[in-house]
Amino acid sequence: MNKLILSFVTIISLCFFSCKDTASTTSSDSSSSDSVAEKNRANSREVYRAMETGDVSKVDSFIDKDIVDHQDNVKGLDSLKKMFASMHNSIKDLKFETIANATDGDYNIAYVKMTGTTVDASMGMPAGTKLDMKFVDVVKMSNGKAVEHWGYSDRNDMMKMMEMGKGQNGMGNKMDTKMKDTSIKK
């Protein structure tokens, strides 16, 4: 009977201590992951701010020099900075509003609304085209820096902007033709 009680007490003690250790580890991991998540969110906001303002001086601290942007087929931080500057210069009143953001430390996902007005045709739309679109950015993180990016636009927003561009410099018709040529055949 004493052996049974001793075994029971030992098992309960082990469970108690292991639960306590797990809780303290989970709490510590949770606060660590919370700080990583907040850092990822803050860095995401800084990237959008860099595009809005044209000031890319801070992006080196949170974007890897060998970044790969799969959406725009851009490789390397210097090329990405040039793309940001070009976007800033081609769209007046450029604004990004983060609607939602999720991160697990390895990936940061942001649902974003972008607005502005094209100043020239360099973005593939006639000058004066109003932009109001939503997209999702997926960024892979490594050692606290963005190493890969994928972007996904709302197809409906893109179609609306293409419709607005029809008849202006023929851009809408060219884009429609290209869309027809690349459609999936059944």
Image: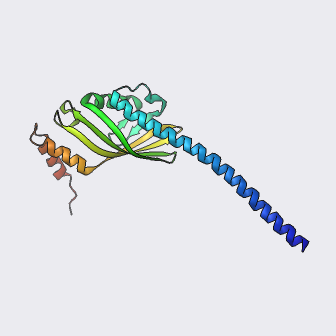
Residue 182 lies left or right of residue 58; in this view the side is: left
Q: Quadrant of residue 167 in the image?
A: top left
Residue 158 lies left or right of residue 141; in this view the side is: left
Task: Pick the quarter of the image with the N terminus.
Answer: bottom right
Residue drawn where x is 25% and y is 30% of the image: 90
- Does residue 80 lie above or below 5 as drawn? above
Q: How many marks?
A: 0
- Does residue 15 lie above or below 98 as drawn? below
Residue drawn where x is 75% and y is 59% of the image: 16
Residue 52 locus on image (x, y percent)? 33, 31
Residue drawn where x is 44% and y is 27% of the image: 58
* Residue sitting at the far right: 2
- Does residue 117 lie above or below 113 as drawn? above
110 or 172: nearer the viewer: 110
Residue 152 locus on image (x, y percent)? 33, 47
Residue 63 lies left or right of residue 29; in this view the side is: left
* Residue sitting at the far left: 167
Residue 72 locus on image (x, y percent)? 32, 39
